[in-house]
Amino acid sequence: MVIRENFEKKLEELKGKISEMGEMSIVSLEESFDALKAQDVEIALKVMEEDTDIDNLESEINHFAIWLMAKEQPVARDLRVVIGVIKISSEIERVADFAVNIAKATIKIGKTTSLLDITHLEKMKEISVEMLKKAIQSFIEEDIVLAKEISKLEDEVDDYYLETYKKLTAYLSEHPEETNQLVQLLFINRYLERTADHITNMAESTGYLIKGKIYDFNS
């Protein structure tokens, strides 16, 4: 009984680290977009510097999870939890990478008249943050209903992605002098669409943890 309680505590500790990593990635997304809106290079550089902390935490989580598998040799549901932690930490790290990519795009845009208002990028970022919060909560609380909600939000991001792509490419054909900024905004559009994909992968991992079967929320 004591051994089981100790194992449960370690699983909760792992989940706590996933929650911490998720919060750090949310901050990165928010800050990268703050940098984009304000065309603030200092904030963009801060996002890039802080990414190392997220990478380090992912490494810590993975080592902890592997150690736990080797020491405790979990089976069935317990094993799914540990595997889920490893997979989800990888997805969160990718989300943080996209925040860094947005920061880099901001630096490349530089100081110019912003064309952000002709896009849906801010709305896509807001939905992505909501998705990430739900994904973390659904994993921690093992809530399959919450996990399934994420796929609906991803559909919204996909719709905004297509609309933004059409608006930017149309504007580009009429204003070739704005090529640099428009190309970077197109990249950011893609980064946010991929961010939503990776968060949906997190929800699928939660579904596997709870039900023991593979889900495809992207279909």
Image (spheres, rainbow, N blue to C red):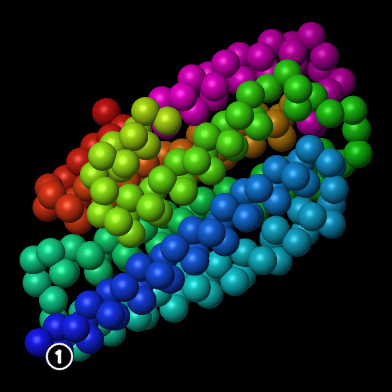
Left or right: residue 16 versus residue 203 is: right
Q: Is residue 168 magenta?
A: yes
Query: From this viewpoint, is residue 187 visible?
Result: no
In the displayed structure, 34 sits above or below 1; it is: above
Question: x and y percent of residue 206 in the render?
Answer: 26, 51
Image quadrant holding the N terminus, namely bottom left
Q: Residue at x 37, y 41 (%)?
A: 200
Q: Is residue 161 above or below residue 93?
A: above
Q: Residue at x 49, y 54 (%)?
A: 94
Q: Quadrant of the C terminus?
A: top left
Magenta-colored span:
154-181
Q: Position of residue 211 (x, y in %)?
A: 13, 49
Q: Closest to the observer: 8 or 66?
A: 8
- Count of numbered circles in the view: 1
| Type of amino acid under label 1 | Val
Given residues 112 and 202, the one toward you in this image is 202
Residue under pointer 1: 2
